[in-house]
Amino acid sequence: VCGSTERSPFVERETFTFVRCSCDLVYKSRDQVPSSQQPPALWNERYTKRRRHRVAKSRRQILDLLNHVAPGPLLDVGCSLGYTMEAAKQLGLDAHGIDVNPDVLEMCRERGFDVEFGDVEGPYPFENDTFRMVIMKHVLEHTPDPRSAIREARRVLAPGGGLFVALPNLDFYRAARSPETHHFFNTGGNQHFVYYATRHLSRLLEQEGLQLARVHPHLWQRHATPLEKLASAALLPLRAVVSATRTRLDLRPEFWLMATQPEATLQR
Ligand SMILES: [Zn+2]
């Protein structure tokens, strides 16, 4: 992202090593990257549990993105069991998903979701400018080539569309304080190639021509229901304090980031 090749050892394990760039980005050595994309570990009960919670969270994330873009067709990259597509359908949106795992694709189809095989790095099986929203939740850390993924997202995003990204937060205080023992660099480290802080991702997105719209959740969602708005309004002062504190003290294990596709695109 920063263009530097300087790096220092960060965390060493038997099966992988993470290094730290001079810009603080943490990534796996390139020689430890498998030659072809392996499907992630088969989905298990961890993914089917708390379905309601996951759908509700996806709904909040889509509503956050709708603060920046007009409603329209949505693509969930790495759609897993379809929580985001379910939330999108509840909001009346045309929802599509791609994933590399044949098992989850089959389960999604059984649930009536519109899904295709597709890798996060691309190519995505869609024409240019197809979507108003592209969602990438916990997928960019799984690829050694995030730039390809961002370019592909941008290709299928219509002008004025928006990208929503959620990622493990490299700045999370526990991971920063003791990386040797933290999940990010143990079990998580097996499947993850890159750990970003918000500054790294926003830089990457801007390099690829997207405009940073928002880091972290919104306190107010324009397209929420009247009841949701009432609840938000009542809790607004409290939520503002909690949110600012979580950001300032690096209490967020994951971060959300939204960016938009410029309306007038001169060149892709
Ligand atoms: Zn760097």
Image (cartoon, grey):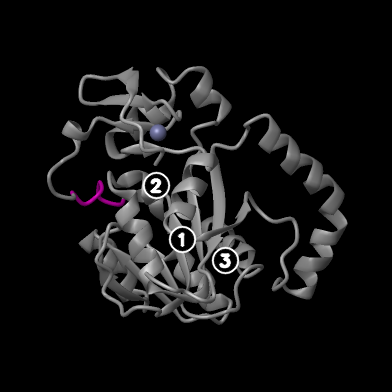
At label 2, which amino acid type do we have?
Answer: Arg
Does the numbered disc 1 mark a residue whose Cβ is under 8 Å from ligand 1?
Answer: no
- Binning the other alpha carbons within 10 Å of mark 2 as few (below 14), some (14 to 19) or many (20 upward) gives few
Q: Residue at x 36, y 70 (%)?
A: 155
- Binning the other alpha carbons within 10 Å of mark 3 as few (below 14), some (14 to 19) or many (20 upward) gives many
Ligand 1 is in which quadrant of the figure?
top left
In the rendered image, residue 234, in percent from the top left (x then y), is placed at 87, 57
Q: Secondary structure at mark 3?
A: helix
Mark 1 sits on what residue?
Answer: 209
At label 3, which amino acid type do we have?
Answer: Ile
In this picture, which residue range is highlighted in magenta?
38-43
Q: Is residue 187 left or right of residue 179?
A: left
User: Distance between the Cα atoms at labels 1 and 2?
Assistant: 36 Å
In the rendered image, residue 60, in percent from the top left (x then y), is placed at 62, 61
Mark nearer the viewer, 1 or 2:
1
Asked if residue 67 can be seen in this view, the reply is: yes
Mark 2 sits on what residue?
Answer: 46
Q: Is residue 145 left or right of residue 267?
A: left
Mark 3 sits on what residue?
Answer: 62
Q: Residue at x 24, y 30 (%)?
A: 29
Q: Secondary structure at mark 1?
A: loop
- Binning the other alpha carbons within 10 Å of mark 1 as few (below 14), some (14 to 19) or many (20 upward) gives some
